[in-house]
Image (spheres, grey):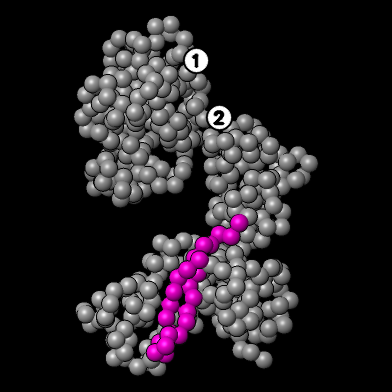
């Protein structure tokens, strides 16, 4: 007996998705003998791109049953059945996740029609459900809706059953779980981890560190590591013997700690993160007319940059934002390559630096304000962020534009002396990665507290 199903979800982070619609057809190998179709209130918002894809929006689900209200029916219709789905890894994982939130261990044998189709119907141009069934002449209505996709999967599965004349492939393809089940060792490691922001270290049995990561929820992140089925995750699952961690409270502090620890320890499975995490930098120069120009180009160790970006797209996005915020000229920030005045001057949003109708002195004041807000050059300051407990805060020290380290202080204690501040921080290495992490975090978190330190 088979339970052929399709699930639509909210989208979002791995293992945080919610079900929005489910369709299940109980199939005895010849005909459908039972069915269950329902919208589901996921109790979380639907990602906009998913709403556009499926046509299911938040308003449609407001009065739909919640998952716990349909869970019993799902258990009943799938009992003693092999769960069949097109990309069973996804649908079965989502079901198991929803049931685990209810404290119920949902376990069924499963079968993936993608894998089966590749074996029984080779050389197809695509094995996505829509293109595959279209190529096989199987009708499909209501694409990306649970009922339409489930009905198409029923028809596809009937075809696959007829093609598997020896019945060997189907029996070989059925498995208890298309994703490796978490064994007791990994479950213990997850249980011991805190649901807090910080850095975690995965160790081999001899204590060697094989992976370092950061997360706003260490327990949840470990669960993702230990349920992922990609090649790297499987290797980590086999080798890890213990996990240690350091709670930082602040995500910024966790990012800085992770970056430094990876450089120092060079863990086996962090190879991709040992390189610099930024690619582009913002530089400035003064042209022959006396105007300060801004320019984005490949980050270089030979030049002093204002700030850095992960990629060109991010840099361009911030340039557009800053051009409006500081009323800058599009030509002088490299966003308008045309001749004559820039487009913003045409619509009266540029004061005319592009055609020298605004003085360099007036224009440069606004550019300098942008530089001062985004550059660490020669600055002394402390950055205050969240602490590990409710009565403390984290602090990062910047001296002469260089990152010196971070520490923690009690909310009732006023830091009014640079020597006291130096004494409470843990010294860390200043490098371009650390500078990029801090500048990027400040750009995206406007509420973070920055306190200048007067030069002695």
Q: As rendered, which of 237 and 81 lies closer to the eye?
A: 237
Question: Where 399 falls versus 81 (above or below)?
Answer: below
Residue 453 in the figure: left or right of residue 101: right
Which label is found at residue 180? Answer: 2
Whether residue 142 sits left or right of residue 280 in the image: it is: left
Q: Residue at x 57, y 75 (%)?
A: 303
Task: Please name the residue shown 31% across and 26% down the image.
Answer: 132
Say which label, 1 or 2, has the lower sequence index: 1
Span of residues in magenta: 275-298
Tell me what residue is drawn at x 63 percent, y 49 percent: 271
Residue 292 at x, y percent in the picture: 43, 84
Q: Residue at x 67, y 73 (%)?
A: 404
What residue is shown with label 1? 172
Quadrant of the frame with the N terminus: top left
Q: Eyeballing the image, is 425 above or below 286?
A: above
Q: Position of residue 379 (x, y in %)?
A: 59, 82
Asked whether disc 1 touches disc 2, contact meaning CB atoms under 8 Å apart, the reply is: no
Number of numbered discs? 2
- Mark 1 secondary-structure assignment: helix
Q: Secondary structure at mark 2?
A: loop
Is 433 drawn above or below residue 156 in the view shown? below
**152 and 44: which is toward the camera:** 152
Q: Nearer the viewer, mark 1 or mark 2?
A: 1
Q: Is residue 285 magenta?
A: yes
Counting other residues with Cα less than 10 Å from the Cα at mark 1, is it few (<14), some (14-19), or many (20 or more)?
few
Whether residue 207 is visible, yes or no, is yes
- Image position, residue 15 (x, y; %): 47, 42
Toward the top, the furthest residue is 166
């Amino acid at each position: 007996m088979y339970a052929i199903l399709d699930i639509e979800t909210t989208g979002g982070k791995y293992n945080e998705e919610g079900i929005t619609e489910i369709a299940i057809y109980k199939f005895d190998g010849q005909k459908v003998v039972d069915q269950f179709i329902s919208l589901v209130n996921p109790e979380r918002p639907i990602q906009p791109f998913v709403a556009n894809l499926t046509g299911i929006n938040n308003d449609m689900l407001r009065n739909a049953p919640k998952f716990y209200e349909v869970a019993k029916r799902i258990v009943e219709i799938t009992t003693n059945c092999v769960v069949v789905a097109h990309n069973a890894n996804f649908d079965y994982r989502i079901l198991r996740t929803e049931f685990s939130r209810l404290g119920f261990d949902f376990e069924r044998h499963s079968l993936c029609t993608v894998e089966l189709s590749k074996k029984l119907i080779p050389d197809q141009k695509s094995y996505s459900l829509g293109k595959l069934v279209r190529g096989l002449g199987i009708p499909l209505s209501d694409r990306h809706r649970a009922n339409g996709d489930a009905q198409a999967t029923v028809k596809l599965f009937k075809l696959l059953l007829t093609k598997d004349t020896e019945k060997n492939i189907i029996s070989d393809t059925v498995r208890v779980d298309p994703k490796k089940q978490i064994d007791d060792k990994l479950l213990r490691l997850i249980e011991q981890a805190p649901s807090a922001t910080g850095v975690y270290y995965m160790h081999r049995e001899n204590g060697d560190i094989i992976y370092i990561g950061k997360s706003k929820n260490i327990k949840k992140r470990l669960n993702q590591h230990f349920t992922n089925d990609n090649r790297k995750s499987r290797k980590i699952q086999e080798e890890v013997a213990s996990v240690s961690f350091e709670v930082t409270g602040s995500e910024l502090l966790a990012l800085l700690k992770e970056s430094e620890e990876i450089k120092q320890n060079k863990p086996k499975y962090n190879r991709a993160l040992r390189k610099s995490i930024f690619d582009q930098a913002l530089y400035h120069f003064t042209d022959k007319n006396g105007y300060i120009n801004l320019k984005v180009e490949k980050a270089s160790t030979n030049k002093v940059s204002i700030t850095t970006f992960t990629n060109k797209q991010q840099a361009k996005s911030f340039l557009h934002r800053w051009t409006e915020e500081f009323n800058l000229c599009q030509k002088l920030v490299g966003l308008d390559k045309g001749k004559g005045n820039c487009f913003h001057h045409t619509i009266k949003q540029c004061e005319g630096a592009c055609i020298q109708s605004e003085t360099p002195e007036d224009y440069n004041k606004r550019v300098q304000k942008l530089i001062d807000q985004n550059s660490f050059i020669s600055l002394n300051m402390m950055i205050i962020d969240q602490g590990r407990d409710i009565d403390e805060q984290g602090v990062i020290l910047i001296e002469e534009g260089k990152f010196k380290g971070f520490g923690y202080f009690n909310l009732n204690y006023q830091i009014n002396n640079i020597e006291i501040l130096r004494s409470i921080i843990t010294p860390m290495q200043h490098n371009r990665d650390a500078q990029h992490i801090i500048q990027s975090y400040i750009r995206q978190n406007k509420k973070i507290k920055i306190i200048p330190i007067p030069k002695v």
